[in-house]
Image (tube, rainbow, N blue to C red):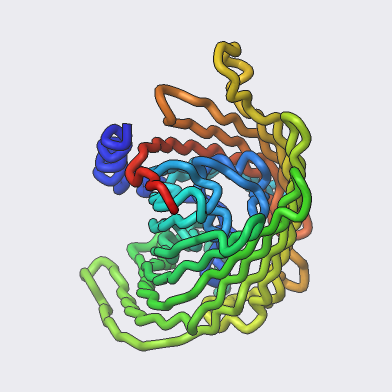
Amino acid sequence: MIRVIICILCSAFLSNQAIEAQQGGSNYSIFGIGDIRQSMGAYYDGLGGTQYAVPSFHAVNIANPAMWSESKLTRLQIGFRFTQTAIEQQDLSASQNFGKLDGIAATFQVDTAMGITISGGIYPFSVVQYSVLTPVQAGISGLTDLSGGALNYGKGGVSAAFIGSSWKPMQGISVGFAAMRLFGNISRVIQTELYTQPFISVNQRTDRFFGSGLKLGISANPIKGLTLGAGASIYSDLEYDSDFRQSTLNTGGVAYDTIFMQKGVSTLPMQLGFGLSYVSGRWMMAGDMEFQDLSGISYSQGKSLFRSGRRISLGFSRLRSYQLGTDYIDKVQFNFGAGWNQLYYSVNGIDIDEYYGSFGLQLPIAGSAMIDLALQGGMRGNTELVRELFLRCGFSVSAGEVWFKPFIRE
C-alpha cells in the first residue's frame, strides 16, 4: 500500500504547477509571511486544528513530536487542501480559490515498547495567495476619462522540512524533538494598467527565504484516558534575498526596465502550545491553546501593525471501533471542532480575527490504509474593512507496514 501512496505522490508533484496556477486565496495573506500553518493533514483539520495532546496511530503531528510515539507502524502520509473564499467589502464582493499540497511525511516505528519513532517530511509553514484589483482614479483636472486598474497579487510561501525522533523514557511519559529547515519563495506583483491609454507598469518582487528551527514536545498520561501535551518551536532569524524588477510599457515598447537586489532579515519568535485530551469509551474531547508573539516581524508590514498571535481550539470525536465483525459505519471515526484565531496583524487599527467550525471523517480502507476528510468553514475580518467567508476542504491518505519487527529482551 505504501507503494500506491508513492505513485499518488509522484502524480501530485507532476500536477502541482497547474494546481497552484489558480490565483486568489485570503487577501489578508498579503501581510507578513502569509498565513502560518501549524498542523498538517485532514485529521487535525477535522478537530479544528486541535492536536497537542491528541494521540493518533496514523496522522503525523507537527506541533508536538512527542505524539509520534503513539504510532504502531511505519507510515507514509500525503495530503491536499482546497480553499474557497468569498470576499466582501461594503457593496463589493468577489470569489477566489486555490489548491495546494498539504504536506508529505513519514514515521518509522523502530521500537513500540520504548516508543522510539523517527519521523521526517515537508509541509507548508506559511502560505501567501492573494489577488486584489483596485480601480485607478483620475487625479488630474481634465482627465476625467482616465480609467484603469492596479492588480496586486502574490503567491508562494515558506516551507518547512523536518526530521526528528520520539521515545518514552518512562511509563506514561513521551518526549520528542525535530530539527527544521525553513525555505521558500514569495512573489509579489503590482501591475498598473490604463485602459484608455497605452500604458502598463509592472513592479515585481521575489523573496527567497532561509532559516532553521527546533521543535520540542512532551506528553504525559497521569490517569487512564487523560493525555496532557505541550510543544515549543524555536526559530533562528529568517533571512531573505530579494530581487526587484520595475518595468514600464507604452506605445514605444519598453520605456523603462531595471532590476536590483538586496538582502534582509526578520525575527521569527518562539511558538508555544498546550493541550489536553480525555477518552471515555468511544468518545474523545480535546482542547488546545497556542501563542506566538509576532510583533517583531520586520517583513512586508504594509498598512498592518503586527501583534501577538493566539489560537484556541476544541475538538470532539466519536472514535472508531476495532472489533472484528462490526459494521463498516462503526469503523468510521467522526470528528468535530471549532476555534478562534487571533491573527498576528491589525489593519488600520482594526484587529483581524478568525472564527471557524469543522467536521471530519476517518475512513479505513484496505489493510492499515486510512483516508481522512475534513471541512472547515468560518469567517475572517469584519465588515469595517474586508470580511472573508471561507471553506477549506482537506484530504489525506496514509498507509502503514511493519518494517521493524520486535526482538525478545532478556
Residue 18 x/y as whole percent? 31, 43
Residue depicted at x 48% and y 75%: 213
Position of 247 relative to 328 (above/below): below
Is 104 displayed left or right of 253 in the figure?
A: right
Position of 352 relative to 42 (above/below): below
Position of 165 relative to 300 (above/below): above
Q: Considering depth in this image, is 337 or 295 the residue closer to the camera?
A: 337
Residue 224 x/y as whole percent? 76, 45
Q: Considering depth in this image, is 137 or 259 the residue closer to the camera?
A: 259
Residue 125 x/y as whole percent? 49, 62
Position of 145 relative to 263 (above/below): above
Q: How many numbered circles are shown?
A: 0
Residue 375 x/y as whole percent? 61, 36
Tell me if residue 85 can be seen: no
Residue depicted at x 68% and y 38%: 358
Residue depicted at x 75% and y 43%: 225
Report the residue that reaches farthest toward the front. Answer: 410
